[in-house]
Amino acid sequence: MAKKIILAIIIIILISIFALNFISKDSVDVYIDGENVTVKTHSLSDANSNNLNSEICYLTIDAMNDTTSNITTLKKGIEDICLKHNIKNPEINIDSSIGKNQIPVIVHVSGTSMLPTLQNGQKVLVNKTKNIHVGDIVVADSEEYGGIIKRVGDINGNSIYLESDNKNISYEYIHGTLYEIKGITTWVDISSINGVVIN
């Protein structure tokens, strides 16, 4: 009888230890829909969850707008914030409207150079990635033109050729000079690509 009681106590202790480890795992759940960020932290530490969640939200918004950030740098930034709040080795889960470990961003189209595919003023969802292929529509930063949305026409190593879908050429007479108006074509470095349009 005593052996059964001791065995039962050992089983209860083992189950309690397992349950405590399972329950006490600190975690951060981030959801991104392209415009908004939701953060939920689960921790047994005495961290101020409002401050922690707020810092992670702002970091994620910055990552959405920073051309050099990606899922790895976002997770590292979240880990650093958690460490600052005495949360070590949290499980970080990034989910989004386009899947796990993806950073979607909503971008507004400006201009008519991507007609008929994209309309002036249209919102598009962009997957923040540099994994691109010829034919993709991408958002990029051009030294010459600033922020642009164009189709990938060619890839040569790290050089990406971007072109407009709208091939119409028009002319405008301004102050005695006739100007040719046509869509942009330009080469950019892969580092200038912010993401791929997915809708």
Image (cartoon, rainbow, N blue to C red):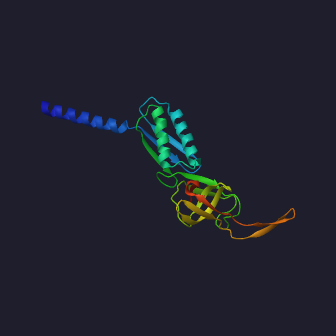
Is 144 rendered above or below residue 82?
below
Work out whether residue 122 can be spotted: yes
Q: Position of residue 24 (x, y in %)?
A: 37, 35
Where, quadrant-wise, is the C terminus in this rendering? bottom right
Horizontally, is 112 left or right of 69 in the view? right
Please tell me which residue is depicted at 51% across the width and 49% down the height of the picture. Answer: 70
Q: Camera-side residue: 62 or 25?
A: 62
Q: Nearer the viewer, residue 195 or 54?
A: 195
Is residue 1 visible in the rendered structure shown here?
A: no
Q: Is residue 31 above or below residue 199?
A: above
Residue at 15 percent across and 34 percent down: it is 4
Name which quarter of the figure residue 45 lies in: top left
Q: Could you tell me how many numbered marks the image carries?
A: 0
Please determine whether, in this image, residue 75 is positioned above or below residue 175. Answer: above
Residue ID at (50%, 52%):
102
Q: Position of residue 166 (x, y in %)?
A: 68, 68
State the image coordinates of residue 190 (x, y, percent, origin top left).
55, 57
Q: Is residue 37 left or right of residue 79?
A: right
